[in-house]
Image (cartoon, rainbow, N blue to C red):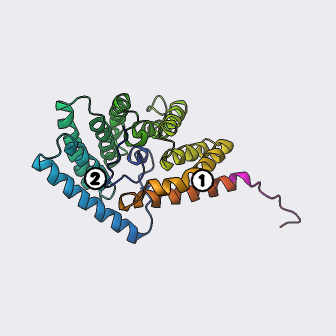
Amino acid sequence: MANNDNRMRRWTAGAAMAVIFLPAAAGLAFGDGAQTKIFAARAAVEYQRAQIQLQSGTNGPAAAWQFARACFDLADFATNDTQRAEIAGQGIAACQELLARETNSAPGHYYLAMNYGQLARAEAPSLAAYRLVKQIEHEFKAAADLDKSFDYAGPERCLGLLYRDAPGWPFSIGSRRKAREWLEQAAKLAPDDPENHLNLAESFLQWHESDNAKGELKTLDALWPKAQTNFTGEAWEQSWDDWSTRRDAARKKLTEISTPAKSPRNGE
């Protein structure tokens, strides 16, 4: 069953895994500074709430993975790699303790992978970061086997991003074929989630498949009004800020690709 308990939803699934393969100067792009501060403050509040719940022993096993989720979210706003690694380490420890008791916890495997991703991001571009990639892959696959629909097909979505952005053989596990399979599977399992179609549209643009990208953006435009009524409230503001920015960027890129360059005439 998909998890709808999103007090603080990560702004884009699998982002930490993708970032470890980008140049060191690259980072996660949020909206304006004021909005970023609001999102960071909310992440900090949720982290404190989840930590208290975990320490109090209430809410059973869910307290562990909810704390790990809060760690992943807060790590996005870390001001340095040391801080990011420390926060991710807390999320990793919570999931490992949970999985020691309940090996079949899909959320436990899922958020363990997510926090491994934040740790890899903090350690990039070292070899240690690349060594974590296989662990990330393993945990996402375990989560997918246990609950394909968790977090709106989150395991499939994140595996697709991981295969898309990782270097290919012999350096890492990157594979366009696997990326396409997992991202398309995510869109089939959770077709109403804008994130899944955005990932496909962006991937098709990256792969120079403009017709497929156009089709995904058309699908996204059709589901957009319904999604705005389904994913509502403060918990989804960060996602909508991200989705809107990325949809506009994808549209712009598609227009640039579709518009042929004009040949200069008369020296113009």
Q: Secondary structure at mark 2?
A: helix
Residue 260 counted in the magenta span: yes
Quadrant, the C terminus: bottom right
Looking at the image, residue 48 sits to the left or right of residue 11; the answer is left
Residue holding disc 1 = 221
Callout 2, which amino acid? Answer: Arg
First in residue order: circle 1 vs circle 2: 2
Dot 1 crowding, Cα within 10 Å, few <14, some 14–19, many 20+: some
Magenta stretch: dominant secondary structure: loop
Local SS, label 1? helix
Q: Is residue 127 magenta?
A: no
The image quadrant where one finds the N terminus is top left
Residue ranking furthest to the left: 56
Task: Give x and y (percent) for residue 212.
Answer: 65, 42
Q: Up-down: is 181 above or below 257?
A: above
Q: For residue 84, which numbered disc appears in the image?
A: 2
Query: Foreground residue, 33 or 97?
Result: 97
Quadrant hosting residue 79: bottom left
Question: Residue 17: which numbered mark, if any?
Answer: none
Magenta segment: 257-266
Q: Residue furthest right?
A: 266
Percent across and percent down for residue 191 are 51, 42
Residue 69 to residue 176: above or below = below
Instruction: Identify the residue at image location x=23%, y=41%.
Output: 92
Pointer 2 local density, CA inside 10 Å: few below 14, some 14–19, many at least 20? many
Q: Measured from the top left, where is residue 90 in percent x and y?
A: 20, 47
User: Relative to 58, is 5 on the left or the right?
Assistant: right
Amino acid carrying mark 1 in the image: Asp
In the image shown, does 206 or 255 lie closer to the viewer? 255
